[in-house]
Image (cartoon, helix red, strand yellow):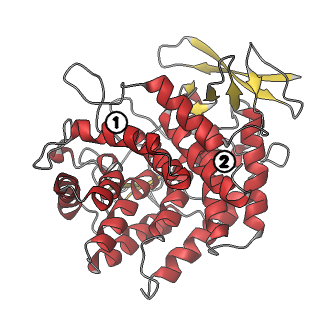
Amino acid sequence: MVHCRNRILLAASGLLVIRCCLFLTAAGRASHGNRAAEPDRAPWSERMATSEMNRRGKSLVYSRESQARWNYETGVFLKGLEAVWQKTGDERYYQYLKSIVDSYLGSDGSIATYNLADYNLDSINSGKILLTLHEKTKDESYRLAADRLMGQLEKQPRTPEGGFWHKKIYPNQMWLDGIYMAAPFFAQYSRTFHIPAGFDDILRQVTLVGVHTHDPDTGLLFHAWDAAKTQPWANPQTGCSKSFWARSIGWYVMALVDILDYFPADHPGRRQIVDRFGSTLAAIRRYQDPESGLWYQVVDQGTRPGNYLEASASCMFVYAMAKGSREGLVGAEYLEFAEAGYRGILRHFVRVDSTGLISLSCICSSAGLGGPKQRNGTFEYYISEPVVTNDLKGVGAFILASVEMERRNGGQ
């Protein structure tokens, strides 16, 4: 049986917009010509990666005629391809991600469409692939481009306590998203080029946003914090935004588990990051939907009218729990929680079309705070953003989660 939750939302124009996310039961019968996920086929990470490569073609490759830009969404997808390539050794994935990155780079390390003056942490995320390519090829253009991004972090505007502003246009604001965008690259760069002081700064970023966004009642993290406490969306006492947006917490826990790949074992702050990772996952676990194994768009609001089970955050939590369990950062029980979530993702969000292409549905297109649209951070705001299929943030997170689950399940 197919369940469809209609969400009727009042858009800024005053028009009613009706949207529907499709959810399938365990029976997994077809909906609108699509088949539900079929776990007995080839590994899902490879199927999704290949599907997205076929769908996107050369659209992510930069040219003067294309709409492609150096952005964080592409970077999430490329990290997924990197994981599949490293798991399988299949050069198709490597060549595809390399062709995308190469299209942006000049021999001097310049990056097409990147603007240092924006001081936008989102622009840093794809830099992780530069470091991967430099390690493999020793081509100096990758190192020079990575140096350029590192130069941004060295000059990034900061809060009075030393936290990176999310963007120059967002003064004194730290967002959970920004930790994923910048800190894993910062950690990988610091490890690669032997910059021990970098890890002290990474610890500062992780701790500041973690402390200031933490809610003592739920253990969850608010989306963002305004150090100046002046933004319309900020609590005038705490500076925190109003809601627990699932994907923002997903960015944070993915960042922590990836940072720890590079953080020195003997650094005195490593234990703090491990503990923060564990406590955040423990809070998230308490809000895992017991029926589906998934998480809601606004984490603590459950079945409140308009709320919905969201794919990208669910994939991020599965990835963080599975990887954290595999690496001994959290207990073995988190693998069970990850498995429940992954089953839910396959059952509710993954579709196979008549040609065998895989799709991921029910992804929040984007969400933020302030800006020209004066996004106010309320529950009503977060559920009003468009819900889409095959957004790269969701697809990349699904591939990463799938690779982790396949490592635990013999490759399938």
Q: Position of residue 135 (x, y in %)?
A: 31, 62
From the top left corner, tell me how far across and down residue 223 is, in percent.
50, 51
Residue designated by label 1: 371
Q: Residue furthest left?
A: 108
List x then y, in percent, for residue 401.
Answer: 62, 50
Q: Position of residue 52 (x, y in %)?
A: 51, 30
Q: Quadrant of residue 172?
A: bottom left
Q: Which residue is under mark 2?
A: 299
Q: Earlier in the sequence, mark 2 or mark 1?
A: 2
Q: Secondary structure at mark 2?
A: helix
Q: Amino acid at mark 1?
A: Gly
What residue appears at the point 19 percent right and 23 percent down from the top-left corner?
64
Q: Can the viewer see residue 297 in this picture?
A: no
Looking at the image, can residue 25 be seen? yes
Q: Which mark is residue 199?
A: none
What is the crowding at mark 2: few (fewer than 14 residues within 10 Å), some, or many (at least 20)?
many
Residue placed at 35% from the left, 30% from the top?
A: 60
> Taking 237 as reference, is 204 above or below it?
below
